[in-house]
Image (spheres, rainbow, N blue to C red):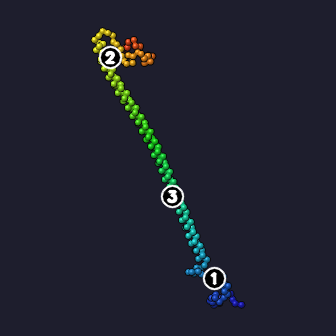
Amino acid sequence: MAPSHPRNGASDRDGNPGERSRVQRRPGPGGQPLWLAWVQLSISTMLVVLFLVVLGKVREQAAIVGELEQKLSTIENSRSQDRTTAMEQQLESMIQRLQSVEKVGDHLRDVDRQQQALRQELQQLLSLSRPTIEGSSEPPRPISTPQAASPTRPSALLPGSPRPGATLLRPPAGNL
């Protein structure tokens, strides 16, 4: 029988070839075991796949962020349009109010002018009727207006108005 250990520094080449595969593993490049190369390859592949998955997720999130930004800008635009519409409505209502105020102001100016004209006419009538009243001994006659001079229309007389035959009382001349 042959001894199982090498004699005097003899190599394993001399021994059984089956024993050699059990004891010694085939070295890979650079003297590393073969399984270590496979582990390195699998880790590298896993890192590449993980990188591609992360890259895909980043692109997907970028697309979602883009959509959300577009929706946000759409909402902001619609809000600004709503504000613009509301402001236009307020402006239109203010314009209508200003126009109505101007109409009322014009109407008041017209009424003021009419009052001034009536006061002037009254002053003229009073100045015309005073010389005849002061110079004569007759009692003062009421100033006749076109409505009071035509008693043919009884509907022109109001319930509290003086009758055609009644005398009018005038305020003192200093109060006008």
Residue at 43% over, 18% down? 156
Q: Which amino acid does label 3 sit on?
A: Gly
Earlier sequence position, callout 3 versus callout 1? 1
Label 1 SS: loop
Which quadrant would residue 118 be assigned to in this image? top left
How busy is the neighbourhood of tag 3: few (under 14 within 10 Å), some, or many (20 plus)? few
In the rendered structure, find residue 66 and report the number of the disc placed on it: 3
| Residue 158 appears in the picture as rendered | no
| Residue 117 appears in the picture as rendered | yes
Q: Nearer the viewer, residue 71 or 50?
A: 71
Which quadrant would residue 151 be assigned to in this image? top left
Residue at 43% over, 41% down? 91
Label 2 SS: helix
Q: What residue type is labelled 2?
A: Ala
Q: Is residue 157 left or right of residue 173?
A: right
Q: Nearer the viewer, mark 2 or mark 3?
A: 2
In the rendered structure, find residue 24 and report the number of the disc placed on it: 1
Q: In this view, does 6 lie to the left or right of 141?
A: right
Marks 2/1: CA distance? Answer: 146 Å
Marks 2/3: CA distance? Answer: 89 Å
Earlier sequence position, callout 2 versus callout 1? 1
Q: Which of 37 and 153 is in front in this view?
A: 153
How busy is the neighbourhood of tag 1: few (under 14 within 10 Å), some, or many (20 plus)? few
Residue furthest right as drawn: 1
Looking at the picture, does residue 7 appear above or below residue 126?
below
Marks 3/1: CA distance? Answer: 59 Å
* Residues at circles 2 and 1 in contact by the CB criterion of under 8 Å: no
Percent x, y of residue 175? 34, 18
Which quadrant would residue 14 be assigned to in this image? bottom right
- Image quarter where the C terminus lies is top left
In the rendered structure, find residue 173 and report the number of the disc placed on it: 2
